[in-house]
Image: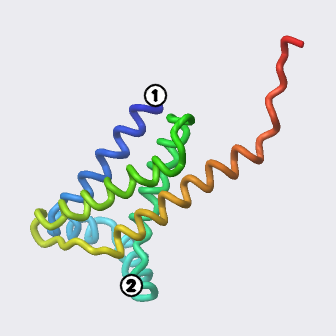
Amino acid sequence: MARVILLVSLIAVFVGTVAPQSAIAWMRVQVPLFALIWDSLDALLPWFNPLHIILYAWVAVLVRVMTPRWSSWLIVLLGSVFAAVSETLQLLAPGRTARLSDVFNDLLGIAIGLILVAMIRRARPPRVDASN
């Protein structure tokens, strides 16, 4: 089930990446609260992209939980490549542009996701072997 959730999440990130500007404009009209929050955050912190941070944090959490033997550095490396490729693909989407600040937001999301998993794992009590 976790693999399905990860796959759906990666597809959502990819679709969001290549969606034309007209699809984003449609969403802004259909979900006015989304537009209000987005515009407010963009005016306050133009380099800050909360959607990128949330999505990449979510994906990092899923990857970390599903691949416990992978090092955090490998997840950061793979996430960096995915972020760079997705921003580059935005150049092909009508009305969209690529922004280096979005890649930094993606990396911030990955870091937040990995830190959250580490904090949760440390907060859990150690497993007790019931066979003793």
Is 3 left, or right, of 113 in this rendering?
A: left
Which residue occupies the foreground of this view, 49 or 100?
100
State which quarter of the image contains the C terminus.
top right
Residue 15 place in picture, x, y as percent = 24, 52
Q: Residue at x 15, y 64 (%)?
A: 20
Q: Where 75 sits versus 23, above or below?
A: above
Residue 85 place in picture, x, y as percent = 25, 57
State which quarter of the image contains the N terminus.
top left
Is 21 left, or right, of 108 in this rendering?
A: left
Q: Where 14 sits versus 30, above or below?
A: above
> Mark 2: few, some, or many residues within 10 Å (few <14, many ≥20)?
few
Q: Earlier in the sequence, mark 1 or mark 2?
A: 1
Judged from the image, the secondary structure of the residue bearing numbered disc 1 is loop
Q: Amino acid at mark 2?
A: Pro
Instruction: Specify how the rendered protein is coloured.
Output: rainbow
Disc 2: which residue: 46
What number is the disc on residue 125? none
Q: Amino acid at mark 1?
A: Met
Q: Residue at x 35, y 38 (%)?
A: 7
Residue 95 place in picture, x, y as percent = 12, 72
Q: Where 5 sits versus 12, above or below?
A: above
What number is the disc on residue 1? 1
Residue 13 place in picture, x, y as percent = 31, 53
> Mark 1: few, some, or many residues within 10 Å (few <14, many ≥20)?
few
Quadrant hosting residue 35: bottom left
Is 65 left, or right, of 132 in this rendering?
A: left
Judged from the image, the secondary structure of the residue bearing numbered disc 2 is loop
Quadrant hosting residue 52: bottom left
